[in-house]
Image: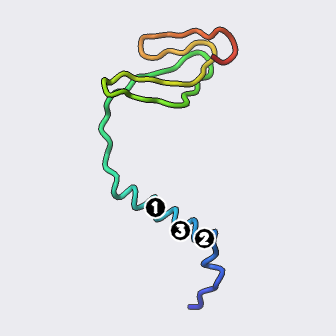
Amino acid sequence: MKISRDCFSRSNLKWALLLFCLTTTAAVAGTPSWVAATSSGGTGTAFSWAVKVSPDSHQYVTGSFSGSATFGSTTLTSAGGLD
């Protein structure tokens, strides 16, 4: 079997390194335990940019929405456009 020099191009090595990192991370990572879950939804578009749970289990979500957005039992109504 003849191995071509092209098999070891920089691009191929980058992909091989990425695949190696992903597979070793998946093999080492354990199953996370759930702290909390809250449903969300609404009448328009909603985007969440960041989610944080504080040490005292308060949940903070940043993002934008249009129409209305419901988080658990709280419903917010947009003032227009994306809020």
**Nearer-N-terminus badge (2/1):** 2
Q: Are marks 2 and 3 in contact (CB under 8 Å)?
A: yes
* Left or right of 35, for residue 60: right
**Where's the C terminus, which quadrant?**
top right
Q: Residues within 10 Å of mark 2 (few under 14, many from 20)?
A: few
Secondary structure at badge 3 equals: helix
Q: Residue at x 63, y 72 (%)?
A: 10
The quarter of the picture where residue 24 lies is: bottom left
Please tell me which residue lies in front, 39 or 55: 55
Mark drawn on residue 16: 3
Q: Amino acid at mark 1?
A: Cys
**Residue 44 place in picture, x, y as percent:** 62, 18
Q: Amino acid at mark 3?
A: Ala
Mark drawn on residue 2: none
**Residue 8 place in picture, x, y as percent:** 60, 78
**Residue 18 place in picture, x, y as percent:** 52, 62
Q: Report, in whole angstroms, how far the alpha carbon at label 2 lies from the one at label 3.
A: 6 Å
The quarter of the picture where residue 46 lies is: top right
Which residue is label 1 attached to? Answer: 21
**Residue 14 place in picture, x, y as percent:** 58, 66
Q: Residue at x 40, y 57 (%)?
A: 25
Q: Amino acid at mark 2?
A: Asn
Quick one: which residue is furthest to the front in this view? 55
Q: Residue at x 36, y 27 (%)?
A: 54
**Nearer-N-terminus badge (3/1):** 3
The quarter of the picture where residue 82 lies is: top right
Which residue is label 2 attached to? Answer: 12
* Left or right of 31, for residue 21: right
Secondary structure at badge 2 equals: helix
